[in-house]
Amino acid sequence: MPRFHDHPLGGLQPVRSGYVDVVDKGGARLYWEEYGAPNARPLFLLNGGCSKIPLMGHVIQVALERGYRVLIHESRGIGRSSCNAVGRQTTTLLAADAHAVLDGAWGTDSAFALFGVSLGGLVAQELLYRLVAAGQKSRIQAVWLTVTGPGSWLRPPPFLQLPLMRMAFKPTPAPPAATTSAAAPPATAAASASAAAGASDEATNGKLSLAKGGGGAMFANDADFTARYSLESLFSTAWLDSPAPPAAVDPAGGAAAAAAAGAGAKAVTVAGAAPEVHVTVGTGGGGGGSSSGRHVVTRREAVWRVFTTHWRDMLALHGPSDFPAVACQLTALLGHYLQPHRAAAIRAAGLRISVGVSTADPFFPEAAQRQLATALGAAVVQVVGAGHMDGAMLDGAYSAFDGGLGWLLDTASKQ
């Protein structure tokens, strides 16, 4: 039963873990973990930028409840993965890394469902092309790409990409001791645009910074994180301010949360387009109170508690130690472009692909997400929320399994 009230992994421990060594770009050692029963349905999860494995903890918990086993790794230089060379990265390089992890952990003939989130969705596109080009499309059972896009041919030139990321994420000096309590988030404000955002609008919609008030998106300590981190950079305000599911408040509330969140998927067919799936993810129901006047815990409070307590476990944003790796990793975001011939090869392979769309994503415009669905010939387009991570934390994580991915796999099994 998912536990959303404490550590993002809810007490889960990997059943296996290990390292894969790669030689590309000076070499790297990639750390991976596997969760779930050995005979469960295999799911290869590619997480987003600046993130460590626990950031996907709620997704992993729901995946296990839905009968999957999950393989996930930390990108070169991030978390427990090392990188020998400091320099610009590409989604092609990161896809080669992911391929090495997949083959090293599960074998070169393993079959799996692929789940790519944000930057992980960009990497997944390149991984799909690698597998299709190598004649290994039969390994791919289904594909779920969410809050991501195809990139653009109009990109900052390669020699500018790393300087831009260094500007955007440059650490700030440690602030004086703060008195702000971590029990509740500071006042809501929009995430500030970084100094590099103007040059990278095409790739990121101009909102790279995760911090309020400028100064880059690296945090010196807990007080700095509490004072400057912006939940609105990742989640929509409406989602944050609605009641949290019971499992985010009470360890015994998981059953109620699952019932509310797993209300089912409704497929809506649009003429000449892929079916569009809308999933009810549960927006009410006594998260921490009732009409009797007790305080109702909001998603904002639940998410803020997890982030302020475990941000160093979840995010590679502790400056200056995380700064070089994050700047290098996110050049892959600036440089990504799913070239038409690659998209055509993936589309021609006849893969079962679904794309999750966020309607007000600050990093990937909705139009770009839908453009990706068209380019890949997605069988399903699913609306997963308004913010970047509405569909990846708390009860929103159910949308991935009761909508796009679950729908694809369930319909495949009935054919």
Image (cartoon, rainbow, N blue to C red):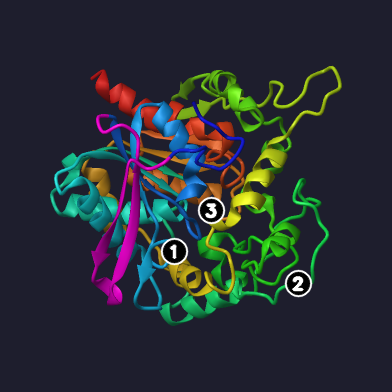
Q: Residue 126's quadrant in the figure?
A: bottom left
Q: Which of pointers 2 and 3 lies earlier in the amino acid sequence?
A: 2
Which residue is at a point 81% across and 29% down the rendered structure image? Answer: 295
Dot 2 crowding, Cα within 10 Å, few <14, some 14–19, many 20+ = few
Q: Which secondary structure lies at badge 3?
A: helix
Task: Kindly report the distance in space between the C-alpha atoms of the residues bearing marks 3 and 1.
Answer: 11 Å
Magenta-drawn segment: 13-39
Between the C-alphas of marks 1 and 2, the distance is 25 Å
Q: Would you say the residues marked 2 and 3 are in contact, meaning their CB atoms lie under 8 Å apart? A: no
What amino acid type is highlighted by mark number 1? Ile
Spot occupied by residue 181 in the image (x, y as percentages of width and height): 79, 52
Structural crowding at the residue carrying mark 3, measured as other residues with C-alpha within 10 Å and reported as few (<14), some (14–19) or many (≥20): many
Q: Of 291 and 282, which appears nearest the observer? A: 291
| 272 up-or-down from 327: above or below | above
Which residue in the structure is indicated by mark 1? 78
Q: Number of marks in the image?
A: 3
Secondary structure at badge 1 equals loop
Contact, mark 3 vs mark 1 (Cβ under 8 Å): no
Residue 314, disc:
3
Instruction: Work out whether residue 6 or residue 319 is closer to the camera in this orientation and state it.
Output: 6
Task: Name which residue lies at 49% across and 48% down.
Answer: 54
